[in-house]
Image: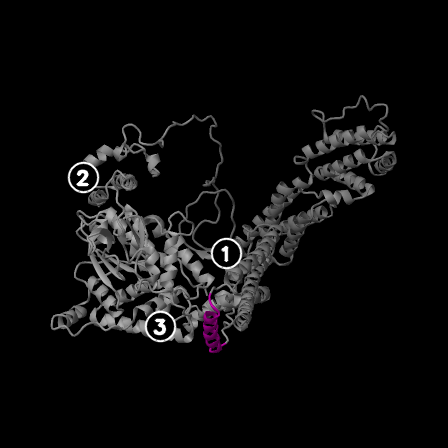
Amino acid sequence: MADIATQIHRWTAATNRRRLTEELLRALGWTLIAAATAFAIWGLPKLVSTFGIVARWLPAESTLLYMAVAVASTGLVVSLGRAIVRYRRRRDDDLATAQRLDRAGGTEDLLATALAVEAGTVMGSPDLQAVVHGKATKAIGSVQRPVERMHAPGRVLGFAGAATVLAIAAPFLLEGIAQQGWFAAEASESDDAEDTVAEQEAPPLPEATKERIEKAIAALQRYEKNPALRREAKEHMAAAREHLQRALTDPERALSSLSRAEQALKQLAKEARRNGMFDQEQLQSMSDEDLTKQMSEAMERGENDTAAAMAEELARRMEEANERDLEKLAEQFKKNFKPSAGGSSSSSSSSSPSGPQAGESAEERAERWRKTLEEMREEMERGESGMSSSKMRELSEELGNGAGGDPGSMERGLDSTRSDIERARGEALSEANKGEGEGEGEGEGEGEGKGEGKGEGKGEGKGEGKGEGEGEGEGNGEGDPSGKPGPGGGPGSRFYPPGGFAPPGGIPAEKLGTPHVGANKGAIKILERVSAGGPSGKDYGELHHEYSEVAESSVRREEIPLTRREYIQKYFEAVRPQ
Amino acid sequence: MHTQVPTHDPHAAPAAAAAPVHAPAPDVAITEQTLVAAQESLGALKNEIEQRLYGQSSLVIQAIIGLLAKGNVLIEGQPGLGKTLLVKIMSAAMQLEFSRIQFTPDLMPADITGSQTLVHDEQGKPSLEFRPGPVFANIVLADEINRATPKTQSALLEAMQEQAVTVAGQPRQLPLPFFVIATQNPIEMEGTYPLPEAQLDRFLLKLEVTFPSLETLRDIGLHTTGHDHGSTSQVMPRQRLIELQELVRQIAVAPHVAEYAARLVMGTHPDQPGTPEPIKKYVRYGASPRAMQSLILAGRAYALLSGRAWLSEDDLRQVAHPVLRHRLIPSFDAKLEGVTNNDLVDALLGAIAAPPPV
């Protein structure tokens, strides 16, 4: 008797397996698409730079990496989740398969009923069960294997395949195209008009410009060696340096390379404002000797921001140090920090000022710091970690506060380097704008500057004047917070307020069970207007609906004779809004 | 002084078993043979009725379903569409006793159920004898039932429900098979007593007689205005009808089909989750559990009529309109917007689909 159930179960399982495979393939397709998209996001800067485009709008590489990982992981999770949901919705049970077969074969629920008969859930005599089972067995014998054909998600997989191939092949293809120079002109145009001029003319860079670039490269090389720097900061500096070197070696692309270098430094400044320049973990991993040595050198070079970060780390170490550690640290202080001009400060420590003094010169300040460091060393030798660490924190704070304005600090240095690059780019642009040509025409203009040019034609070759310009700006502001409270009140909600209308027959709405929000709508005026032949607008429609609901509930009450209920219904039909 | 008057009552309950009008329940079972024979019998009955009642094939099938399901039928239609003729042909084709009650406002319950009359025997001794009313018949046509007062209506409705009447405190069994066809005229509502919803629920089916087509009208004109071509043939004996009624109760109902019937009925209630939007908007009260029983019973009869031993979801959809249309109580909005109960049943069937998604 269980033949039908077994057969149908086998078909159901096969159908479900196919559907699961389809959904997994679809999920795979979407995941591949997401992965290709993520890959494209991650590789976007490289792709763009292949064409020499400076994309200032692009976020930092680390941000792009996060975005790519987010896109890929979201794609994976969403695809799998969707596959699970879809499969659960599409999954058949034996009854559904039987019903599907019944519909296909026109057997009117025979197989579904036979399943129930076999399961013993249909009441009936053995004769009845035999009749149903016999007919079902006959019907199932004529059914071709009803397992659906596999419907692979062709479009999704095709798209995924194309996206994957594109993601893998695109960098190589585009590199090749860029090397052929097919898009060089276009890329340069879109990048910057300056580049076009540069590529057309490609004059050699002036010596002064080269010197500026070399100076900037040297500065960047020096900053890159700073062991406390964040990895991203080093990467930006390295990128800027490479662009600068390319500007020197390839004058044709000097303008775009300088522009990219400038962009890299702007990005660095932006990230430094957000995350800081120094890596705390990096500082913690340095030995006492390295730390003191690097701090001393940074102070010597005037890189006060670097020195401040290191001083902060030293202060932390002092706080946590035991006597032996303090002794070791004191040794390193002695070894790496230069002594003050006045020798040991043990006798004069109490009298010497520890904070910044008004009108103090740089030399005097450096001398004061040296003294402070000596005092710290002596206190450490005495095992007084508290005093020394608080002094070190004060020193760190002073170094940090003055870092931005002090000439020679890394932040200032980077600004200076960026200015050098800007100037170099301006010089390179001026050089590129010089040229031979012919021209006629009148010109108007005001500007400050000097121009030189070779050429033939009419016109003046020199001009001087005052400049005028236009600019756009954006402003942020805050309004006056002292606002006044607004007027209160508003339409309320109540049952049949005075001046509104009451339900017919004085039947309270609560008893009728009809929800009613009886805001005063001027019911009488509405009725008067409509009865005078006025238009039955929306307000009348609402009024009619409310009245008819009340009437509908009330006609079911016994006081209303059966023979009169029809009249009430007809009345409301007659006054129905048009 | 009160005198006990002896009564003579052939329909009284104790004597009911011996009465020839009460056929015993037959011992029949569904087999391949009985199914084929049932289909043949019902086909012959349907053909016989359709030969004399033109253009009302759907009405005939639904009336046979009501008969097979031991239910009662309310027919709504304009005068002259063949309602009475249908009942006459059915009774003649099955050799059933037929009576007709024309309902009027002055009709009394005793006019339907019968009453006790004082009679004198040969010796002049008085006795009370029960004179059965027109309800004591196999097929009762209650014409324009909404014209009688509710008290009189309820006498018939009690008979329909209990298949018995109580006169002078004595329950009296009605003959089997017992089948009431009541008619209502949808026009001329003045001075009528529309059946309350609770009473309507007692009718298994509500049939609507539609106006015939031009071709059917032509056939009616051609064939019914000349000489009578003989009386209706008796194609099914009374006992056979009772056997078929017994077979209907044996039709197999799978749980998923019963669940579909339950979902349909549940879907008529505007306050239930998953109810179709038109039902929520236009229905005030939905169908009762009795509606679900009626749905399955009528579906079973339809399955037997189709020669099947099992009930399908399609059978339920086929009988959904006549079973549910009088059990939905529409709101004023439905009436004002011209939404009929048939529209609502259509919406229900459209929203609550039987087949699972493929």
* Location of residue A9 with respect to A272 vertically, above or below: below
For label 3, the residue is B38
- The span picked out in magenta is A124-144
- Discs 2 and 3 share one subunit: no
Seen as rendered, the residue at the extreme top is A351
* Label 1 close to label 2 by CB (< 8 Å): no
Residue B7: mark: none
- At 72% from the left and 29% from the top, the residue drawn is A361
Q: CA distance from mark 1 to mark 3?
A: 88 Å
For label 1, the residue is A190
Residue A534: mark: 2
Judged left or right of residue A67, residue B160 is left
* Location of residue A354 with respect to B151 vertically, above or below: above
Is the magenta region chiefly helix, strand or loop?
helix
Comparing A221 with A8, the one in front is A8
Q: Chain of mark 1?
A: A
User: In the image, what residue type sits under mark 3?
Assistant: Ala
- At 65% from the left and 50% from the top, the residue drawn is A236
Can residue A147 be seen in this snapshot? yes
Comparing A152 with B268, the one in front is B268
Residue A551 image position (x, y, % from top left): 27, 40
Q: CA distance from mark 1 to mark 2?
A: 67 Å
Residue B130 image position (x, y, % from top left): 25, 54
- Discs 1 and 2 share one subunit: yes
Element type at mark 3: helix
- At 87% from the left and 29% from the top, the residue drawn is A382
Q: How is the image coloured?
A: one colour
- Is residue A129 a member of the stretch shown in magenta? yes
Element type at mark 2: loop
